[in-house]
Amino acid sequence: MHVFVAGATGVLGRRLVPQLVRRGHRVTATTTSEAKLPMLDQMGAEGVLMDGLDAASVGEAVAAAQPDAIAHQMTSISPKPDMKHPDRWFATTNRLRSEGTDHLIAAAQATGVSHIVAQSYASWNGERTGGWVKTEEDPLDPGEGRMRPGANAIRHLEDAIAEVDGAALRYGWLYGPGAIDDTVAVVRKRQFPIVGGGAGHTSWVHLDDAANATVLALEQKAQGVFNIVDDEPAPVSEWLPHLAACAGAKPPMRVPVWLARVLAGDFAVTLMTEGRGFTNAKAKRELGWELSYPSWREGFKEELQ
């Protein structure tokens, strides 16, 4: 199969492309930077320049490649976290999940590409009612204030992919080579405190497991929404101290909700106190997905050794 990987030089794309190549697939992989083309060549892919926010650029790249399937991995998240302003922090990614998705779908339809698998998100953002762990049937959080643009972009992506019978893979909080370096740096400085009781739940997934799920979804022409998370959604009060310990840092400090809201904003408070995690039962059942890192407990240790 010939797979067109849009956004191939991100942390997940760099794990996905080699897996596809090892499985015998031909890969055309995109980047916005000419300096990164040699990296794609070294991974065994044919690298091409493409601007995911430019409809003509996307259309030309897909038409030239003539792939059988598209993997939409386009994001652009600033390495410097801005928890107080998630609308600014994820501004370009939100556009790639909305405008970029539309451009890829239009290019696929014009070129006759039969299947699209796209990156969505499911870490802490389940609807904040009921139980702490959500399935694909449960609604995502609609977002409030500065969180709403991101929630709207995810909803747009999933709705658009559903219309073309593709698959939206809701990756959990990604960790692995290069994925959480900035988070770990903040944890080591004790600048990532537990807010309130830290009851908010989070779902994690290792990059290699997320890439493997993506390969399976492409090979099986999967349709619908899948939560791509590990086996252990957990409250912040459990995973954050463990992450700190694995990083050789002191235990995280604790701050009251009112102070966190002033210092870090509603996004941080919501994640820490009300976030809902996700179950991976559907992906295991329908894709035959098996995890190399069933829990962040072992994964953090290995990553931070």
Image (tube, rainbow, N blue to C red):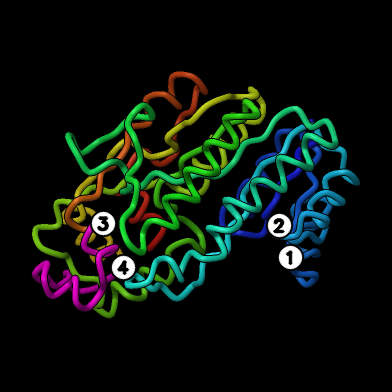
Residue at the spot of label 3: 271
Residue at the spot of label 1: 32
Q: What is the distance, in whole Å, between disc 1 and disc 3 at their CAs?
A: 31 Å
Q: Verify whether residue 85 appears in magenta.
A: no
Q: Nearer the viewer, mark 1 or mark 4?
A: 1
Mark drawn on residue 280: none
Q: Are marks 4 and 3 in contact (CB under 8 Å)?
A: no
- Foreground residue among 66 and 165: 165
In primary-sequence order, the first of circles 4 and 2 is 2
Q: Are marks 1 and 2 in contact (CB under 8 Å)?
A: yes
Q: Which amino acid does the dot numbered 2 rest on? A: Gly
Depicted 189 relative to depicted 32: above or below:
below
Quarter-wise, where is residue 182 in the image? Answer: bottom left
In magenta, the rendered stretch is: 248-270
Q: Secondary structure at mark 2?
A: loop
Q: Residue at x 75, y 41 (%)?
A: 106
Circle 4 residues within 10 Å: few <14, some 14–19, many ≥20: some
- Foreground residue among 171 and 157: 157
Residue 221, image x, y percentages: 65, 24
Q: What is the distance, in whole Å, between disc 4 and disc 2 at their CAs?
A: 35 Å
Asked if residue 218 lies left or right of residue 142, the reply is right
Residue 141, image x, y percentages: 32, 45
In primary-sequence order, the first of circles 4 and 3 is 4
- Foreground residue among 18 and 158: 158
Q: What is the distance, in whole Å, between disc 1 and disc 4 at their CAs?
A: 33 Å
Residue at the spot of label 2: 52
Residue at the spot of label 4: 247
Q: Secondary structure at mark 3?
A: helix
